[in-house]
Amino acid sequence: MALIPFPINTFNHFQGCLPDILDEEISRTSIRLRLHNNPQTDEERKLYQEELDRLSALKYISQLRKGKISRDDFDQKVELTAL
C-alpha cells in the first residue's frame, strides 16, 4: 500500500485546530466526493483520487488526535510533504 502524500502545513493546521474544524472539513470533503462519484475522464479520475486521498488523510489525522492510532501508525499511512 502506497503512502498518501499530504502537505505538512495542512497537517499542522488540522493537528492543532479545534476538533469541530477538522470534523467540518472531513464532512465537506466527503460531500464533494459524493457529488463527483462517477468521474468520466482521466483528469476527473485523478482529481477524484486526490480528493479521496485527502479525505483518508484527514480521517487519519482525526484518529491520531483522538488517540485511536499512534504516530507510527499514522506515518505508515500518510507521507507529510513540503507542498
Image: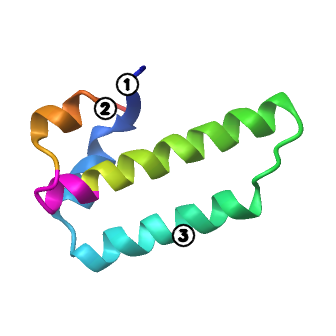
Rounded to the nearest angstrom, the CA distance separating label 2 from label 1 is: 5 Å
- For residue 59, what is the image quadrant? bottom left
Q: Earlier in the sequence, mark 2 or mark 1?
A: 1
Secondary structure category for the residue under label 1: loop
Residue 82 or residue 2, whichever sits in front: 2
72 lies left or right of 50: left
Q: Which mark is residue 3?
A: 1
Q: Is residue 1 inside the magenta stretch?
A: no
Give the residues in magenta.
Answer: 62-68
79 lies left or right of 83: left
Rounded to the nearest angstrom, the CA distance separating label 1 from label 3 is: 23 Å
Q: From the top left corner, tell me how far across and down residue 44 is, in percent.
A: 79, 39
17 lies left or right of 51: left
Residue tagged by mark 3?
Answer: 28
Whether residue 43 is visible to the viewer of this picture, yes or no, is yes
Kindly identify the amino acid type of the residue bearing the numbered disc 3.
Arg
Q: Earlier in the sequence, mark 1 or mark 3?
A: 1
Residue tagged by mark 2?
Answer: 77
Secondary structure category for the residue under label 2: loop
Check contact, mark 2 vs mark 1: CB within 8 A: yes
Q: Where 52 falls versus 3 (above or below)?
A: below
Q: Residues within 10 Å of mark 1 (few under 14, many from 20)?
A: some
Check contact, mark 1 vs mark 3: CB within 8 A: no
Q: Where 45 falls versus 19 (above or below)?
A: above
Q: Earlier in the sequence, mark 3 or mark 2?
A: 3
Residue at figure coordinates x 31%, y 32% from the top left: 77
